[in-house]
Image: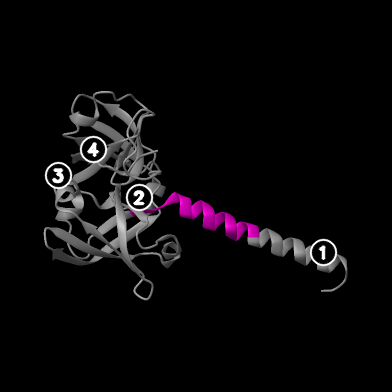
Amino acid sequence: MFTGLIEHMATVSNIQDPSTSTSANKDDGFVMTISDASPILDDCHIGDSICVNGACLTVTKFDQNSFEVNLAPETLRRTNLGELKVGDKVNTERAMSATARYGGHSVQGHVDSTAKIISKVPDGEAIRYQFQLSSSELLIYIIEKGYITIDGASLTITNVDEKENSFGIMLIKHSQSKLILTNKELGDKVNIEVDCAGKYILGSQSKLESLVNDLVEKKLREKGLI
């Protein structure tokens, strides 16, 4: 579990495609090394979870300055991580500890989909962004003044446009120096994780309605009414 409060911007230093190696499993996805990461590695262990641009990844190797992760095919399909290049900056956050101050919202690190930036407009010292979702199915979980995770950062939703399948956020001056979003431009992709509370509530409601409908249909069939 994460809070969506980005701890550090690290740098992609190496990307290895196992499919180019004769000894590797071609279904293993990519191996990525992330460097300039010493601020989040002082208590690191093999197997720890680190959120990278919103995706919960497992540390397979590390030293004082860098760590290595595997990007499985599912991760590559769901996120923008497969588009990263050596030298790109990434948002990172360690899994939260039981004693940490809980300042963001509940972030699982399970990216739902991506969205693209369709508007980026200065608003005083802040920047207003509008994002268009790649999947309209997620819009039901996005509400004005609710939470959303963008590239791992917990942000507040300022507006929702159902016709455009888009939503907006405002990035304050303090956050601009802490997040990779500041350097992204129109058309760039971001990783999206909607608030998990909404997924559980609405998902449970849908399943309950389906169960009730099935039971009603069963009883009507037993009575020969349908």
Density class for disc 4 (Cα within 10 Å; few <14, some 14-19, many ≥20) is some
Estimate the spatial distance between the alpha carbons at disc 2 and disc 1, rounded to whole Å: 45 Å
Q: Amino acid at mark 3?
A: Gly
Report, in whole angstroms, how far the alpha carbon at label 3 lies from the one at label 2. Answer: 19 Å
Q: Which residue is mark 1?
A: 219
Q: Nearer the viewer, residue 140 or 75?
A: 140
Q: Main secondary structure of the magenta part?
A: helix
Amino acid carrying mark 1 in the image: Lys
Where does residue 204 sit, x and y in percent of width and height? 58, 54
Mark 2 and mark 4 lie on one chain; the one further toward the N terminus is 4
Label 3: state its secondary structure: loop
Q: Quadrant of the C terminus?
A: bottom right
The magenta segment is: 192-208
Query: Which amino acid lies under the numbered mark 2 shown in the image of this protein?
Result: Leu
Q: Residues within 10 Å of mark 3 (few under 14, many from 20)?
A: few
Disc 1 element: helix
Label 3 to label 1, Cα distance in Å?
62 Å
* Residue 148, horizontal then vertical, whole percent: 35, 54
Indicate which disc, 1 or 4, sits on the residue closer to the N terminus.
Answer: 4
- Label 4: which secondary element: loop
Q: Residues within 10 Å of mark 2 (few under 14, many from 20)?
A: some
Residue where numbered disc 3 is placed: 87
> Residue 131 occupies which quadrant of the picture?
bottom left
Find the residue positioned furthest to the right.
Answer: 223
> Residue 177's spot in the image, x, y percent?
13, 47
First in residue order: circle 2 vs circle 1: 2
Q: Residue at x 24, y 44 (%)?
A: 91
Q: Tag on residue 76?
A: 2
The label nearer to you, 3 versus 4, is: 4
